[in-house]
Amino acid sequence: MSDHCHMGEKRKMQMKRVAIGSDHAGYEMKTFLLHELARRGFEVADLGTDSAEPTDYPPFCISVGEVVARGDADWGIVLGGSGQGEQMAANKVRGVRAALCNDPYYARLARSDNDANVIAIGARVVAPQFAMVILDVWIGTSFEGGRHKQRIDLIAEYERSRR
């Protein structure tokens, strides 16, 4: 097993608590991912919505961000039509680094370079099964640190000084 795969497995074992939220557009994908993540041994907190009835995404995504920022979940997943607004809402929470990842390449970079702690996926862009592929890459990728850590520290410093 390569070091990268080994680190991914270690990360999977350490990060078991997940918060997930969606609007109506992401509800079906959320239901699928809840099942898949639970089947794989993750503890998943479903923060809504509870149906495909039209609803606004910000409260659900902000709730996911707050749970992650408090440390009550190791990472979060926000889902909606495109994932774009969901990412923006989650990023309003201090300490959240949400990344829109509608493909595995961005998922890997979001973790390795940006230490993303919330992932946004567009349910009208990505099929549920492919979303799980994206999550597998995201979960299995470790933050590289190094020059990237300095950049993350600058973001955190700005957050602390402005709120």
Image (cartoon, rainbow, N blue to C red):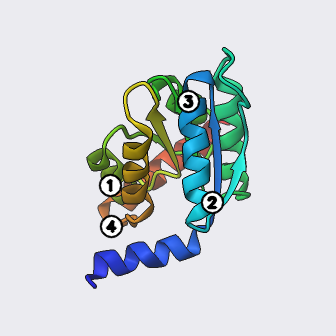
Q: Farthest residue toward the top?
A: 54
For mark 2, give the secondary structure.
helix
The residue indicated by pointer 4 is 146
Which image quadrant is residue 50 in? top right
Taking depth in this image into account, of 159 and 107 the one nearest to the observer is: 107
Q: CA distance from mark 2 to mark 3?
A: 18 Å
The residue indicated by pointer 2 is 38
Return the disc, 2 or 1, that comes first in the chain's sequence: 2
Structural crowding at the residue carrying mark 1, measured as other residues with C-alpha within 10 Å and reported as few (<14), some (14–19) or many (≥20)? many
Return the disc, 2 or 3, that comes first in the chain's sequence: 3
Asked if residue 138 shows in the view, the reply is yes
Taking depth in this image into account, of 151 and 137 the one nearest to the observer is: 137
Return the disc, 1 or 4, that comes first in the chain's sequence: 1
Residue 46 x, y percent position in the rendering: 71, 45
Relative to 136, 49 lies left or right? right
The residue indicated by pointer 1 is 108
Q: What residue is shown at x 43% (from left), y 24% (from top)?
A: 124
- Nearer the observer: mark 2 or 1; the answer is 2
Q: CA distance from mark 1 to mark 4?
A: 16 Å
Residue 34 x, y percent position in the rendering: 61, 49
Asked if residue 74 shows in the view, the reply is no
The residue indicated by pointer 3 is 26
Q: What residue is shown at x 63% (from left), y 44% (from top)?
A: 20
Q: Are marks 2 and 4 in contact (CB under 8 Å)?
A: no
Residue 9 x, y percent position in the rendering: 43, 76
Return the disc, 2 or 4, that comes first in the chain's sequence: 2
